[in-house]
Amino acid sequence: MLFVILVDIASWPFKKICFVLLLKRCFVSFCACLKMFAMLLRPRKDHKFRFVWNIYHHGVGYSILILGIINVFKGLSILNPKHTYKTAYIAVIGTLGGITLLLEVVTWVIVLKRKSAKSTKPLKA
């Protein structure tokens, strides 16, 4: 994790990009590395800290995605390319977001069906 951040910081003098943009990118890299290392510390499903770990895991993951998307928009505004690049990026992000939303709904339907099937099973005596 430290190596990724140091390489990112070492490349700053060679880039003509806004300092805030570089700090955001460094923060996103740090959070992504932290998230990968947290996978090693994941508690078992029956552990009492699993609920808190899940909140942390999803929160950091979604914040990485949001900051990454914002960072690309900021970079596009600094570089000032043709308008078609921004439109294409919005289309790609929108398509991926729609697919993600669809898959999330399908996952929750499956989870809720499994929970309802478990609760309707008779208890063994």
Image: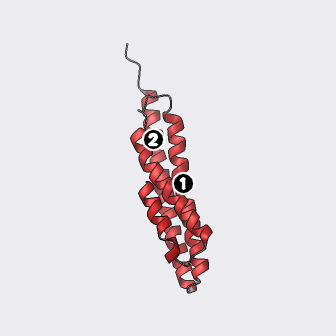
Tell me: residue 85, above or below residue 102.
below
Image point (43%, 38%), residue name: 42
Side (left or right) of 22 relative to 114: right
Residue type (three-letter) at the residue carrying disc 1: Tyr
Q: Which mark is residue 62?
A: 1
Helix, strand or loop under label 2: helix
Within 10 Å of disc 2 (Cα), the crowding (few <14, some 14-19, many 20+) is few
Q: Position of residue 125 (x, y in %)?
A: 37, 12
Image point (56%, 55%), residue name: 63
Residue extending furthest top?
Answer: 125
Q: Position of residue 54 (x, y in %)?
A: 50, 41
Q: Nearer the viewer, mark 1 or mark 2?
A: 1
User: Is residue 73 or residue 112 the one in the foreground?
Assistant: 73
The quadrant where residue 82 appears: bottom right
Within 10 Å of disc 1 (Cα), the crowding (few <14, some 14-19, many 20+) is few
Side (left or right) of 81 relative to 125: right
User: Is residue 4 or residue 36 the one in the foreground?
Assistant: 4
Q: What colouring method underlies this structural image?
A: secondary structure
Image point (52%, 74%), residue name: 13
Closer to the chain start, of discs 1 and 2, is 1
Residue that carries the numbered disc 2 in the rendered image: 111
User: Can the viewer see residue 108 in this picture?
Assistant: yes
The quadrant where residue 120 appears: top left
Residue extending furthest bottom?
Answer: 82
Helix, strand or loop under label 1: helix
